[in-house]
Amino acid sequence: MTLKQAQLLALALPVALLGGAYISQYGFGLYPCEMCWWQRYPHFAALGFALLSFVIEPRRVWVALAGLAIITSGLIGGFHAGVEYGWWQGITGCATVDGGIDVMDPAAAPIIRCDTAPWDLFGISLAGWNFLFSTLGGIAILVLSVRGAGKEAN
């Protein structure tokens, strides 16, 4: 049963976190910065790996890859949260204006800074929450996928 739990968690966690990100973006106007996008990419990969785990052997390998992708997103989120909290300098030009954007044009796309949290809950930014949920969830997926490995078939 643990492999099935790992598969379901590997599918549900990125669906929930990406769903929350898109609801925040399109429902509440919290547009993502460059580092926010970096956190989404591993969740997309995790979805693919999780879906593959339902149809292609060895299932544990696909689930473990999904768990590792989710942890990767969490670690990126942790780094991003540190940039937002001012613990360290970011490695991206999130505040830099692309040469093709006219900053004097009110219809131009908004500049989204990576070093400013647009929203927080209990003092934890969205990137911080992603760090917590993704890192802990990814570890849980890995633990569930290896628990009882000798008892269950791949």
Image: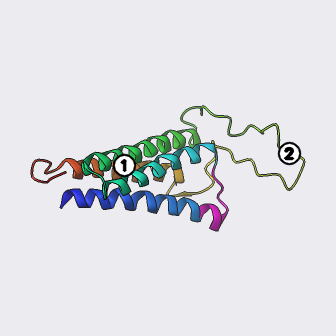
Residue at coordinates 83% horizontally, 52% vertically from top-left?
A: 108
Judge left or right: residue 75 versus residue 31.
left
Residue 15 point in image, percent of width and height: 45, 61
- Residue drawn where x is 83% and y is 40% of the image: 100
* Residue in the foreground of this view, choosing between 90 and 64: 64
Give the residue number, with chain letter if any, for mark 1.
Answer: 66
Name the residue furthest bottom: 27
Task: Check disc 2 and report the residue beneath it.
Answer: 103
Q: Is residue 101 visible?
A: yes
Q: Residues within 10 Å of mark 2 (few under 14, many from 20)?
A: some
**Occupied quadrant, residue 47:** bottom left
Circle 1 residues within 10 Å: few <14, some 14–19, many ≥20: many
The segment highlighted magenta reads 24-32
Q: Nearer the viewer, residue 97 or 119?
A: 97
Tag 2: amino acid: Val
Q: Is residue 83 left or right of residue 149?
A: right
Tell me the amino acid under the disc marked 1. Answer: Ala
